């Protein structure tokens, strides 16, 4: 019974996600679904990204959260177009929520739209939002066992950012082991060690975004 | 439709949780549901707790995880009775899973049973496991905005452990603000700043457990 219900929910979600994907394609918007645990550093990554790339591309942000607008308030201070989705306690964003938020973002299509999902290393990985790519942020303070413990998240994500590398000396996180585990789960994944507060390693991330946004603009699928 | 389905799932869960609660009461076992984000330090807290208290009380552990037995392996090294529940990707434990695990724990009732939930700051808070109390572990590296962003978790938890205080100097976590926010959400909550790796602050936690286990042994509801 529950399996059937889950299939129905995912089926309805996927129909809307397909519509979103068509919209992103026709408007040549690169859409990124940004995921990770609570406190992994998703919003701090977004703040740095907006600061670095707003001069060269139009970026819009959809912020997913249970109740508050704390993250959207931070993004707004970066002078970015941002829409808040509150899930009222729900543990992930789904495609209908994103479709509703898009309708309020205004007419002019951005080059890049980042959808910051609810802080959760499990459920968001199961829901297609019509995005072009998923990325996951894992803080080194969470421990290097997390890719193997939450494999779907890493299997789905084109990029895995290993954040808070400035705290590496104070943890037992093994960067080589985590990277190897991620590559085992997802051999094509790009693994990027970064410190979003210090700025270390972020050039690789910016370059990856630049490449994907440029390709989408040229209509490369 | 989805609301009705959720009500059915929670209704079935609560029926089993009530049965579990009766069993814990009649056998005078204090049952704790331990929750928190991935990497907040739940298993490290358990390792420290087993080391400190195994000489004075019988402790059993139920480990919840999506696929691996990594946490159960760590607990087993502490010479504790432990059963692994794998949720096969599921984002929380439910009462039927716990009932199944209990059946394999053996006849002799422990004084304390700790159920380590799936690493997730959202979904586990919604499911009653028949426990006597819930506790949440929040790492200071996750940020002091988390209680207000994930209020149900803190509303449900009798104890909030603010872990990794050894990393406080390297974060902008405001202990006073987080404590105030937790007390706003849940005025009766006990907030305990701890470092599970260094051992700081854990005596309060051990004393709280001792008190609750002793009360349960004496049949105090």
Image: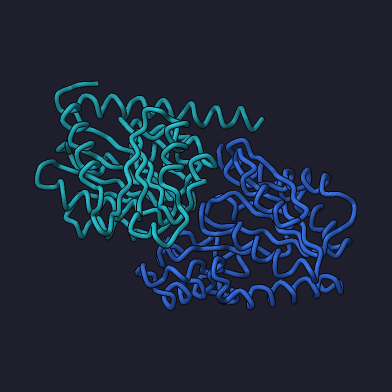
Chain colours: A blue, B cyan
Residue in front for this viewpoint, B60 or B161: B161
Quarter that holds the N terminus of chain A: top right
Q: Position of residue B77 (x, y in %)?
A: 20, 60
Name the residue: 16% across, 55% down. Answer: B79
Judge whether residue A128 can be spotted in this image.
no
Q: Is residue B42 above or below residue B33?
A: below
The quadrant in which residue A113 appears is: bottom right
Please count the marks in the image.
Answer: 0
- Residue A26 in the image: x percent, y percent? 88, 61
The answer to whether A88 is drawn above or below residue B75 in the figure is: above
Query: What's the residue at 64%, 73% (across, down)?
Result: A205
- The picture places residue B42, in percent across and down from the top left corner, at 34, 51
Q: Is residue B147 left or right of residue B115?
A: right
Depth order, front residue of B216/B210 = B210
The answer to whether residue A137 is left or right of residue B129 is: right
Residue in the image at 42% along x and 57% along y? B67
The image quarter containing residue B180 is top left
Can the viewer see residue A143? yes
Residue B129 x/y as whole percent: 37, 34
Give the residue displayed 33% in from the left and 49% down from the top. B63
Q: State the image quarter where residue A51 is shown.
A: bottom right
Quadrant assignment for the C terminus of chain A: bottom right
């Amino acid at each position: 019974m529950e399996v059937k219900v889950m299939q129905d929910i995912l089926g309805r979600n996927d129909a809307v996600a397909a519509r979103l994907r068509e919209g992103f394609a026709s408007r040549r918007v690169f859409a990124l679904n940004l995921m990770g645990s609570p406190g992994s550093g998703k919003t701090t990554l977004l703040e740095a990204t907006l600061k670095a790339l707003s001069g060269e591309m139009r970026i819009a942000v959809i912020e997913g959260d249970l109740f508050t607008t704390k993250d959207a308030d931070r993004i707004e201070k970066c002078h970015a177009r941002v829409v808040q989705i509150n899930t009222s306690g729900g543990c992930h964003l789904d495609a209908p929520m994103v479709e509703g938020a898009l309708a309020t973002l205004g007419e002019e299509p951005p080059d890049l739209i980042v959808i910051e999902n609810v802080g959760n290393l499990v459920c968001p990985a199961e829901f297609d939002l019509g995005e072009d790519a998923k990325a996951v942020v894992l803080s080194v303070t969470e421990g290097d066992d997390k890719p193997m413990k939450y494999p779907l998240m890493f299997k789905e994500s084109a990029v895995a950012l290993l954040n808070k590398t400035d705290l590496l000396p104070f943890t037992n996180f093994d960067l080589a082991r985590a990277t190897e585990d991620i590559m085992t789960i997802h051999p094509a994944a790009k693994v990027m060690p970064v410190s979003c507060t210090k700025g270390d390693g972020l050039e690789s991330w910016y370059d990856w975004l630049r490449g994907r946004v440029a390709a989408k603009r040229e209509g490369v699928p």
